[in-house]
Image (tube, grey):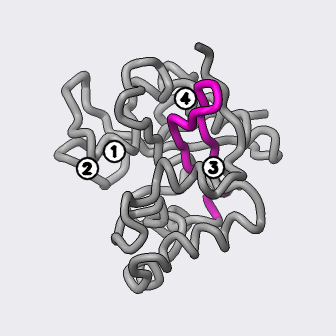
Amino acid sequence: MAIEVRPATDFDDVATIVGPKRPDANVCWCLSYRIGSRENESLRGTARGEKVAELMKTGPIGVLAYEGDEVVGWAAVAPRADTTFSRNRKIPHVDELAVWSVWCIRVRPGYRGKGISHALLAGAVQFARSQGAPAIEGYPVDNRGEKVDLTMAYVGTRGLFEKAGFHKAADTTSVINGFPRVLMRLSLQ
């Protein structure tokens, strides 16, 4: 079956991918890079999902992948200026271009290994382009083909971004799971 990627407008589908199994659990909800650390740390339990619902009132906060009617994946994408990457000391700014960032790619267990990450990244690029983004950046690990722990693989790999046409624009001082992160960029003009 074909994978369709579309803007994340359905809260229940977003919750299926990034929300907890128990509504009161303290999981990321993909807020770590979207809001400031003080607010992120203060949100507990159901308040985290409520924050996501609030953010979704202004429009899609990412893209979702579907296999038929089943939601199977998520990619967070937004203007860098609307994320903590706008002031992150470990991820440099290459220039002053109003780029968008894609920073979380997640595929549901049972659906991995089917190319859904590639479809999600392509969908994030298409969404950013449709919103007038001049370029899009990602900050994946440069794992040099080594296995990345699944809990830390959400940032993607350099190879994933290269296959999508991104090029390395800069090194960073950020490290995840022992692997350096690189700044990958794709011009959309």
From the image, which quarter does the N terminus lie in? top right
Q: Identity of the amino acid at label 4?
A: Phe
Q: Residue at x 64, y 31 (%)?
A: 69
Image check: 123 left or right of 166?
right
Q: Mark 1 falls on what kind of element?
A: strand
Of the image marks 3 and 4, the number of the one nearer the N terminus: 3
Question: Which residue is disc 3 drawn over?
Answer: 62
**Residue 132 in sight in this render:** yes
Q: Which mark is residue 181?
A: 1
Question: Which residue is disc 4 drawn over?
Answer: 166
Label 1–label 2 contact, CB within 8 A? yes
Image check: 176 left or right of 76?
left
Image location (x, y in percent) of residue 173:
31, 54
Q: Mark 2 falls on what kind of element?
A: strand
Position of residue 56 relative to residue 36, above or below, is above
Position of residue 189 relative to residue 78, above or below, is above
Nearer to us of marks 1 and 2 is 2
Of the image marks 1 and 2, the number of the one nearer the N terminus: 2
Part of the protein shown in magenta: 63-81
Q: Residue at x 57, y 52 (%)?
A: 14
Nearer to us of marks 1 and 3 is 3
Q: Identity of the amino acid at label 1?
A: Arg
Along the line of sight, the residue nearer the viewer: 118 or 81: 118
Magenta span: chief secondary structure: strand
Q: Which mark is residue 176?
A: 2
Nearer to us of marks 4 and 2 is 2
Of the image marks 4 and 2, the number of the one nearer the N terminus: 4
Per the model, the C-alpha gap separating discs 3 and 4 is: 19 Å
Image location (x, y in percent) of residue 42:
41, 86
Per the model, the C-alpha gap separating discs 4 and 1 is: 14 Å
